[in-house]
Image (tube, rainbow, N blue to C red):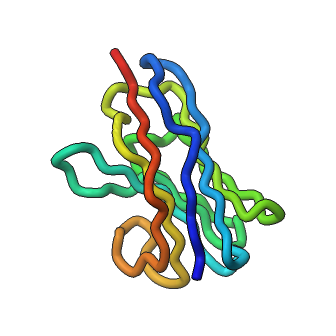
Amino acid sequence: QVQLVESGGGLVQAGGSLRLSCAASGRAFSIYDMSWFRQAPGKEREFVAALSRNGGSTYYADSVKGRFTISRDYAKNTVYLQMNSLKPEDTAVYYCAARQWGEVTTTSNVNYWGQGTQVTVSS
């Protein structure tokens, strides 16, 4: 099994920055595509960003393009989400996800989920 633990969330003002981390344990995650999703109260979980297992491809939701950057450190089994120019609409619980196959922009066929980290952006 693989355990994913998110950290780095918090409260920031609009325009500020946060870096989220997702640390994997139990098995090296080089065989997984990694994604970030987020879920606001009363909303469905939505795609934010993804990085292919070989690091060759990145994917971003239109709402975060140009502001968020996903990266991974294979030696540390950790994936990051650097969030800049944060907006109140970015407020949500952010979840890390790992999958071996399938479309990276959906919640389907996710092999492992983290428990989430809260990001709150004030006006």
The N terminus lies in quadrant: bottom right
> Please, is residue 26 above or below residue 8 in the view?
below
Give left or right: position of 80 versus 44: right
The single residue placed furthest to the right in the displayed view is 75
Residue 54 sits above or below residue 21 on the image: below
Q: Position of residue 24 (x, y in %)?
A: 65, 66
Q: Nearer the viewer, residue 5 or 80?
A: 5
* Residue in the image at 43% along x and 49% along y: 94
Left or right of 113 in this view: 42: left
Q: Which image quarter is the C terminus in? A: top left
Question: Quick one: which residue is furthest to the left in this view?
Answer: 42
Residue 122 found in image quarter: top left
Q: Residue at x 41, y 65 (%)?
A: 105
Task: Identify the residue at horizontal 51%, vertical 37% (top origin).
Answer: 9
Residue 108, percent across and down? 34, 76
83 in relation to 85, above or below: below
In the foreground, 56 or 77: 77
Q: Is residue 120 left or right of residue 32?
A: left
